[in-house]
Amino acid sequence: MKLAHWLMFAACAVAGKAGAQSWAWDDGTTPFVVSPPEVVERMLRLAEPKAAERLVDLGSGDGRIVIEAARRFGTRGLGVEIDPSLVARARENARRAGVEALAHFEARDLFETDLRGVDIVTMYLLPDVNLKVMPRLLQDLKPGARVVSHDYGMGAWTPDELIELTVPEKPVGPAGRTRILLWLIPANAQGDWTSDLPGAGGEWTFRIAQQYQKLEADAQVAGRQMMVRGSRLRGEELKLVVTGNLDGRVRNLLFRGLLRGDRIDGDVTISDGEDSTTRPWTATRKR
């Protein structure tokens, strides 16, 4: 931790009700700063945990995110915290909340935590730590897994959703403002795809370039260029909005599908401005 960061957090730590606001060092890289209940609520709202899922909180402090996910949604959770005294506190908090069977806490380095098979990762880390964690998130988490961060982003990987709210009791940050950011691990859409659509021009080809969840797409049908007006990749869900001439008429097409491996399965809605029809759509990536 740089001295400037130490001074910032030391100067901003605010004494509230007993136990309401506290902070301490974890591993010398990120300080422990309590997330107010409203922030925990919004983080979980974005994460949308389910009972069958697994959640990991990196730098879990007193355990409140893992405990609340277990209490409200029945989600199994692991809190990772390098400070053993905070781990002990989190375990006691889980016992008092009656969720010790679902909410587990371990004293370990967050960089050594196995994230494979995890559905949700939550974190309140400093920006440089986020950037160090980011490659692990992209490598180990499956497409569609959610990452929720309190306040800080991950550089060029822009969030899928971002909300801001005023939290006056927050002990650090600019004027009590809080940002909560959500990312969905993107599936791999990069490459050339083919699709046969009888009644919609025949063979379609799509060429997609990808940076994180942002796409640049090109579409052709029977060798004719079409205009891709919009695209979105949200986890495994792909959408392409295409406009062009089909059979002498201008048509708008909305392609929607789930991307799994080298195949997309979904549907396409074709409209001429008056009438529309929806039919199955499947695309295969060329090897």
Image: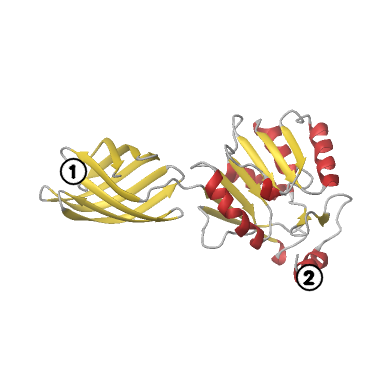
Task: Look at the image and tell me whether residue 179 can be seen.
Answer: no
User: What element does badge 1 sit on?
Assistant: strand
Residue 3, numbered label: 2
Question: Whole-Å distance between the Cαs marked 1 and 2?
Answer: 61 Å
- For the point 62% across and 54% down, the residue is 133
Q: Which residue is mark 1?
A: 203
Q: Position of residue 109 (x, y in %)?
A: 73, 49
Q: Position of residue 144 (x, y in %)?
A: 50, 42
Chain-order first, disc 1 or disc 2: 2
Q: Position of residue 173 (x, y in %)?
A: 71, 64
- Residue furthest to the bottom in view is 4
Decide which of 287, 172 is in the foreground and name it.
Answer: 287
C-beta proximity under 8 Å, tags 1 and 2: no
User: What element does badge 2 sit on?
Assistant: helix
The answer to whether 255 appears left or right of 67 in the picture is: left
* Among the 4 quarters of the image, the one containing residue 237: top left
Residue type at mark 2: give it: Leu
- For the point 81% across and 56% down, the residue is 25
The answer to whether 71 appears left or right of 204 in the picture is: right
Residue type at mark 1: give it: Glu
